[in-house]
Image: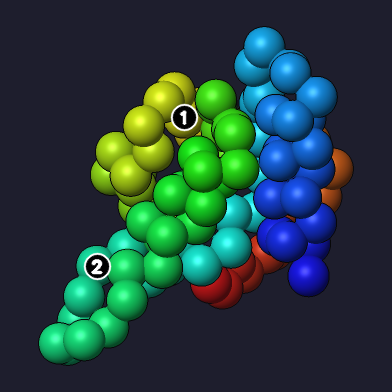
């Protein structure tokens, strides 16, 4: 699992006395579970941030988080980037949209 590999890398960097460890996670797994919908459900998004912090991460950069309030789950800076402007620009300049239908 790539998440475990990334956690192991962060831990290795911490043990090697890195001054800062910036985690780049274009896809932040388990981020959709950011609140409880029923009793006894885990808040897995919080757990993921806690795991990265415990491993030694000092900053996290991610793209298109499920909910921006998840940034508060990490005790450090979180850079939340959005890919939508880049995707829109690509579609406008690379595709013929005269007779297009976009479905989400």
- Disc number placed over residue 35 in the picture, else none: 2
Name the residue: 73% across, 17% down.
18
Answer with left or right where residue 49 lies relative to residue 73: right
Q: Seen in the image, is 44 located left or right of residue 64?
A: left
Furthest residue to the top?
19
Residue 20 lies, with reference to residue 48, above or below; the image says above
Distance of label 2 from label 1 (alpha carbons): 19 Å
Sequence-first disc among 2 and 1? 2
Query: Which quadrant of the view contains residue 93?
Result: top right
- In the picture, residue 71 is in which quadrant? top left
Badge count: 2
Snapshot quadrant of residue 29: bottom right
- Foreground: 15 or 55? 15
13 or 77: nearer the eye? 13
Q: What residue would you read off at disc 1? A: 78
Contact (Cβ within 8 Å) of mark 2 with mark 1: no
10 Å neighbourhood of mark 1: few (<14), some, or many (≥20)?
A: some
Q: Nearer the viewer, residue 58 or 90?
A: 58
Query: Can residue 60 be spotted in the picture?
Result: yes
Q: Residue placed at 21% from the left, 75% from the top?
A: 36
The residue lying at 56 percent from left, 73 percent from top is 103
Q: The residue tagged with tag 2: helix, strand or loop? A: loop
């Amino acid at each position: 699992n790539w998440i475990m590999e990334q956690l192991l890398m962060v831990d290795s960097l911490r043990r090697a006395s890195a001054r800062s460890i910036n985690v780049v996670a274009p896809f932040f797994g388990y981020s959709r579970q950011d609140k409880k919908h029923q009793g006894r459900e885990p808040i897995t998004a919080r757990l993921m941030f806690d795991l990265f912090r415990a491993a030694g991460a000092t900053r996290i950069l991610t793209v298109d988080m499920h909910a921006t309030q998840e940034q508060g789950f990490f005790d450090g800076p979180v850079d939340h980037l959005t890919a939508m402007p880049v995707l829109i620009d690509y579609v406008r300049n690379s595709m013929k949209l005269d007779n297009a239908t976009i479905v989400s």
